Image (cartoon, grey):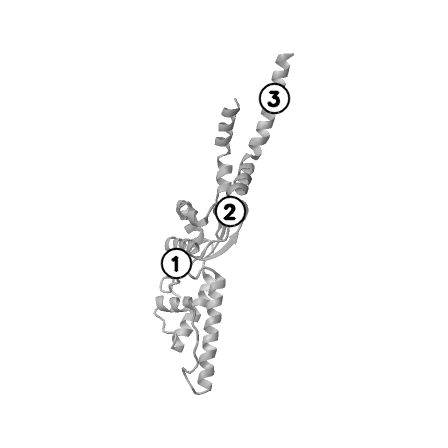
């Protein structure tokens, strides 16, 4: 899979999303196979999810053709296997649109195939913490407080004098 | 006598201050969390979070490139 040739919509955020798409493709394949066995190709009405339609559209894949479905499945398998994973935690559960913005930033600025593993850490109050393969980035309000302890202490001392 | 009391009072004050300062960030964080924790919307934080990400972009990028 070429790194830039396969586009992933921001609605696909995590490995779980990729697995879901792979399961949907398998199910689609099975439906097509069944309708061929019944010698009524195209007779089975299959519901295709919006995200599947989107990934097919951005990659110019015609889901009606076996070869295209196979290519999509291969690309998704490869993505699941080798995409860079970024673990990111927020104080509360993010909405889809918010997550799409964060995912968009990573895909635009870091790597087009970044997948996120989203977690929750209420103790950070605000901001986020990030873990990449070898590094940890703390952008939380808690960390900012700790970094500015000296300033806070100085202000407090001034008031106490 | 009065000077001694004053000195002891000052010493005590310094001790309390040091203890408070040591845990100050945690205390304030806890307070903020209790007071407005559920009102700080993630959507409102987006701009700040993106600017934090931007400030560490190079490090993130380097780790993604080399850290497989």
Q: Tell me where residue B61 appears, x and y as whole percent.
A: 41, 51
- Residue that protrudes farthest toward the top in the picture: B1
Residue placed most toward the observer, A14 or A126: A126
The reply to whether residue A13 is visible in this rendering is yes
Q: Tell me where residue A21 appears, x and y as whole percent.
A: 46, 68
Count of numbered marks: 3
* Residue A153 in the image: above or below residue A98: above
Same chain for mark 1 and mark 2? The answer is: no
- Chain bearing mark 1: A
Dots 1 and 2: beta carbons under 8 Å?
no
Name the residue carrying label 3. Answer: B11
- Residue that protrudes farthest toward the left in the picture: A60
Name the residue carrying label 1. Answer: A112
x 46%, y 87%: residue: A38
> Which disc, if any, is residue B38?
2
What is the spatial separation of the Cα atoms under label 2 and label 3, in whole angstroms? 39 Å
Q: Tell me where residue B51 appears, x and y as whole percent.
A: 39, 45
Which label lies toward us, 1 or 2?
2
Q: Is mark 1 on a helix, strand or loop?
A: loop
x 63%, y 12%: residue: B2
The reply to whether residue A138 is visible in this rendering is no
């Amino acid at each position: 899979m070429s790194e830039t040739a396969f586009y992933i919509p921001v609605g696909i955020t995590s490995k779980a999303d990729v697995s879901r798409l792979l399961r949907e493709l398998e199910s689609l394949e099975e439906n097509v196979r069944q309708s061929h066995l019944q010698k009524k190709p195209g007779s089975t009405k299959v519901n295709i999810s919006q995200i599947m339609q989107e990934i097919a559209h951005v990659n110019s894949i015609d889901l009606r053709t076996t070869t295209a479905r196979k290519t999509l499945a291969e690309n998704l398998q490869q993505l699941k296997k080798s995409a860079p994973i970024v673990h990111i935690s927020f104080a509360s559960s993010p909405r889809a649109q918010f997550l799409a913005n964060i995912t968009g930033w990573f895909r635009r600025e870091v790597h087009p195939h970044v997948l996120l593993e989203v977690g929750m850490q209420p103790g950070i109050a605000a901001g986020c913490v990030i873990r990449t393969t070898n590094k940890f980035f703390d952008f939380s309000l808690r960390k900012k407080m700790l970094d500015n302890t000296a300033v806070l202490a100085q202000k407090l001392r001034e008031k106490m004098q | 006598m009065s000077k001694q009391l004053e000195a002891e009072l000052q010493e005590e004050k310094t001790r309390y201050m040091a203890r408070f300062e040591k845990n100050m960030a945690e205390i304030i964080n806890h307070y903020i969390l209790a007071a407005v924790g559920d009102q700080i919307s993630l959507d409102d934080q987006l701009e700040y979070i993106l600017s934090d990400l931007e400030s560490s972009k190079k490090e993130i990028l380097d780790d993604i490139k080399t850290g497989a």
